[in-house]
Image (spheres, rainbow, N blue to C red):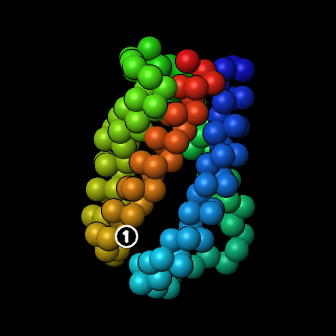
Amino acid sequence: MKKVIFPGLIAGTILFIICYGGLYMAVRLFPGLFIEYNNPLFNSDGNRDLLFYLHAFIISLALSWFWERFKSLFHGSFLLRGLEFGFVYAIVALLPVMWITFSALDITVLMVLSWFSYGLMQAIVAGIIFAKINP
């Protein structure tokens, strides 16, 4: 269990910093994309904001479990293992979720592609961290 929780918390902390710094920069660099979020679909009353801020830890703990279970399937340097891990996650989990999200909600392709890219980046960073500290 220690091989899952400790790396998951480390990756969660790093992803939290990277993702929120990246979000700040993305709003500055691509303001047109974020205008789409002025949609009632994305407005909440604030009761669940903490859940949004904890997502880096939730995804990191889930990916840490996935890494511990399947790490023997990834070979090469820690960078290559992390990249492959991120791509496997993206194809197995993100692609189907983005497909159903796009088909069920009134959102743009650009928005879905940005979410897919964001999730892929998270999985690659987490994979590199896991490959380094839990080979």
44 in relation to 66, above or below: below
Q: Quadrant of residue 77?
A: top left
Quadrant into which the N terminus falls: top right
Residue found at x 31% / y 49%: 95
Residue found at x 52% / y 42%: 125
Q: Quadrant of residue 100?
A: bottom left
Side of 9 where 106 appears, left or right: left
Residue found at x 69% / y 37%: 10
Side of 8 where 120 appears, left or right: left
Total marks placed: 1
Pick out the residue farthest to the top. 72
Q: Amino acid at mark 1?
A: Met
30 in relation to 60, above or below: below
Under tag 1, what secondary structure?
helix
Q: Quadrant of residue 135?
A: top right
Which residue is label 1 attached to? 111
Q: Position of residue 25 (x, y in %)?
A: 56, 71
The answer to whether residue 105 of the structure is visible from this angle is no
Q: Position of residue 108 (x, y in %)?
A: 31, 74
95 in relation to 88, above or below: below
Q: Position of residue 97 (x, y in %)?
A: 36, 51
Side of 133 where 123 appears, left or right: left
Side of 75 where 43 appears, left or right: right
Label 1: how many residues lie within 10 Å, few (<14), some (14-19) or many (20+)? some
Q: Position of residue 64 (x, y in %)?
A: 58, 30
Residue found at x 65% / y 34%: 8
The answer to whether residue 18 of the structure is visible from this angle is yes
